[in-house]
C-alpha cells in the first residue's frame, strides 16, 4: 500500500522535474480498444472525449450496459485513471482484456501508473488485487469528515 509519505515523496519529485505536461487521451488512439469491447459486448461502442482541466475519454455501448471512463493526470506523476469500468457480460474476461490493453497503451504513451478509482465493492477490490494493483493513498480523504475510506479507496499499479 502506498503511504502518505510515499505520496508526498512522489509529489516532491514531480515538483523537482517541473514543466511536465498532461498526456492527452486522443480518440483515434482508442479504435482498437473500441473494437475489442464491441467484440465482447456485441454492441456498437461510442468514444467521447473532453479536454478540460483533465483529459477525459468515455467509451460507452449503444445500450448503455458497458462503460469505461478514463482520465489523464500528471500530478504527482503521469497517471491514467480508470474512473469507471462497468462491463456486460460480467466474468467474461472483458475486464481483464480492457486492463491489459490499457497497460500496453500506458507503457507506449509514457504513463507511470494506472489507478483504479473508487474500488468499493468486493468484486472491484478482488479484480484490482488479482491484477497486481495495491491500495494507494488518496489525499482527498484528508479533507473529508468522518471515515470515507471505504467509499474512496483507490488502487494503483506502476507502469515500467
Image (tube, rainbow, N blue to C red):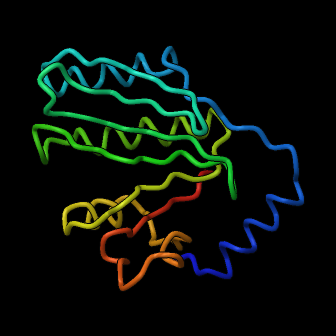
**143 on left or right of 5:** left
Residue 46 position within the rendered picture, expressed as x and y whole percent measured from the top left: 30, 17
**Nearer-the-camera pick, 91 or 141:** 141
Q: Going 58% across and 58% down the picture, which residue do you hit?
A: 158
* Rendered residue at 19%/39% (across/down): 87
Count of numbered marks:
0
Name of the residue lying farthest toward the bottom? 146
Residue reaching furthest front? 145
158 horizontally vs 98: left or right: right
Q: Position of residue 38 (x, y in %)?
A: 22, 20
Quarter of the image where one finds residue 133? bottom left
Q: Residue at x 48, y 18 (%)?
A: 27
In which quadrant of the rendered view does residue 36 lie? top left
What percent of the width, then of the height, locates residue 31? 41, 16
Judge whether 77 appears above or below 92 on screen: below
Residue, x 61% and y 46% (percent of image)? 73
Q: Height in image: 86 above or below 40? A: below
* Snapshot quadrant of residue 117: bottom left
Q: Is residue 26 left or right of residue 99?
A: right
Q: Nearer the viewer, residue 82 or 52?
A: 52
Amino acid at each position: 500500500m502506498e503511504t502518505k509519505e510515499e505520496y508526498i515523496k512522489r509529489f516532491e519529485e514531480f515538483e523537482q522535474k517541473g514543466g511536465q505536461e498532461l498526456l492527452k487521451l486522443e480518440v483515434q488512439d482508442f479504435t482498437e480498444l473500441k473494437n475489442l469491447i464491441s467484440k465482447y459486448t456485441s454492441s456498437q461502442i461510442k468514444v467521447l472525449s473532453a479536454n478540460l482541466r483533465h483529459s477525459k475519454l468515455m467509451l460507452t455501448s449503444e445500450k448503455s450496459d458497458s462503460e469505461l471512463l478514463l482520465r489523464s493526470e500528471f500530478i504527482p506523476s503521469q497517471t491514467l485513471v480508470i474512473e469507471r469500468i462497468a462491463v456486460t457480460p460480467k466474468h467474461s474476461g472483458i475486464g481483464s482484456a480492457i486492463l491489459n490493453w490499457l497497460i500496453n497503451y500506458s507503457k507506449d504513451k509514457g504513463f507511470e501508473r494506472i489507478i483504479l478509482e473508487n474500488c468499493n465493492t468486493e468484486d472491484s477490490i478482488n479484480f484490482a488485487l488479482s491484477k497486481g494493483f495495491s491500495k494507494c493513498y488518496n489525499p482527498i480523504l484528508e479533507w473529508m469528515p468522518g471515515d470515507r475510506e471505504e467509499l474512496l479507496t483507490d488502487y494503483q499499479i506502476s507502469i515500467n
